[in-house]
Structures are given as C-alpha cells and as structure tokens.
Image (spheres, grey):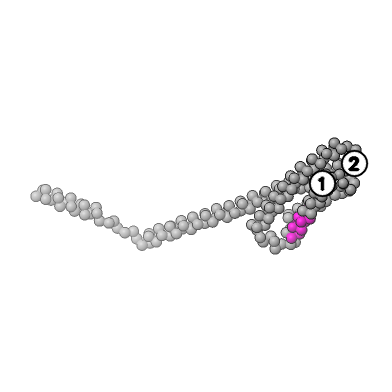
Amino acid sequence: MKLEHSRRASIEKRRKESRPGPRPPAFWLHLRANDYGDHAKRAEAKAAGFQGFMQGSFMLWLKALHIIFVITWFAGLFYLPRLFVYHAALGGSDPAGAERFKIMERRLFTMMTIGAVLAILFGGATLGQVPGFMQMGWMHAKLTLVAGLIVYHFWCYRLLTAFRDNRNQHSERWYRGFNEVPTLFLFGIVILVVVKPF
C-alpha cells in the first residue's frame, strides 16, 4: 500500500510540473509588443541618424578639400606673376638667371594647375551634394569669377611659354599690375561665399 501510494504521489507531482504556467495578462502582452515596436523604431532612427551623420561628414570633407586646393591654386596665382616680374627685370643681361626662372616658372605652373583641377573637382562634388546652391544668385556670381580665374590661369601659361621661347613683350611694370588681378578675384569670391549678398 505504501508503495502504491508513493507511486501515485510521484505521478501526480509530475503532472503538476508538466502543466503550463498561468498565461500573462493581455495588457502585459500588449506592453511587450509595444516594447518590441519601440525598439525597432529606435534602431531605425539610429540607422537614419548614422546615415545622416555620414552624409554630413562626407560633405564637410569635400568642403575641406575644396578649400585646401583653392588655397594651393591661389598661392600659385600670386607667386607665378611675381616670378614674371623678376624675370622681366633681368632683360637679356643674365642668361643663366633667366634659365633658372624658366625652371621655377614651369614647376610652379604644374603645381598650380594640379591645385586648380582638384579645387574645381571638389567644388563640383560639393555642388553635387547641395544642388540647391545653383538656384542662388551669389553662386552664379562666384562661378563667373571662377571662370575668370580659369582664363587668368591660361593667360599665365601663355606668358610662361613666351618667356620660355625668349619672346616676352611686356615690361616689369606691366607684370606688377598683372600680379594684382588674383587679389581682386579673391576678394570677390570670399565676399560672395561668406556674405551671400544676393
């Protein structure tokens, strides 16, 4: 009898342990569902925020590189005409000195051209990120000045080739005036970009 009673008690215990526990209230299930939904929304918001951060960071890198190469370009535009001033002042009195100036002018023009190309490429990429700038008047004026700078750049190349072929026709004084032209472009471009007057 004791053995039979023990077996029954053991079977009953196993039955109780195998029964499912009480189901959670409906409102608790609803709260858990909301938690999962909020978590998904938070994850989506984080992903969107990260994407926005990356886009903004990419834009800042483009602007930084554009500014760096604009500075490089202008450094050449300021210095190359100054070399022309000193080269013209030599006349034909110092052939060895003239040859040194030719080498300096050629190398400087190469670096200046690299700066110009990269400044224009990164500037164009920046505009591609913010196409709305093309609807603004100050941007049109700035691009007009940039076109003027490109013309000035090629004018410098023509003067360089004239010195290289010993057929310069301008005086030292003329080159001093020519040297001041990039300053006017610089003032105009910086004012347009910073002030945005129209």
At label 1, which amino acid type do we have?
Answer: Leu
Task: Find residue 32 and report its horizontal and vertical position in percent.
Answer: 40, 58
Q: Residue at x 74, y 57 (%)?
A: 143
Residue 160 badge: 1
Q: Residue at x 55, y 53 (%)?
A: 50
Task: Find residue 76 and report its horizontal and vertical position in percent.
Answer: 77, 45
Q: Residues within 10 Å of mark 1 (few under 14, many from 20)?
A: many
Seen from the viewer's position, the closer of residues 5 and 162 is: 162
Would residue 150 be counted in the magenta stretch? no
Q: Residue at x 23, y 54 (%)?
A: 16
Residue 186 in the figure: left or right of residue 13: right
Task: Find residue 103 and report its horizontal and vertical position in percent.
Answer: 79, 40
Residue 172 in the figure: left or right of residue 24: right
Q: Magenta segment, which residues?
A: 140-149
Q: Which residue is mark 2?
A: 91
Which quarter of the rendering shows the C terminus?
Answer: bottom right
At label 2, which amino acid type do we have?
Answer: Gly
Q: CA distance from mark 1 to mark 2?
A: 15 Å
The answer to whether residue 10 shows anywhere in this view is yes
The answer to whether residue 191 shows anywhere in this view is no
Count up the numbered dots.
Answer: 2
Question: Judging from the image, what secondary structure is the residue with disc 2 in?
Answer: loop
Mostly what secondary structure, the magenta segment?
Answer: helix
Q: Residue at x 49, y 55 (%)?
A: 43
Seen from the viewer's position, the closer of residues 93 and 21 is: 93
Would residue 145 be counted in the magenta stretch? yes
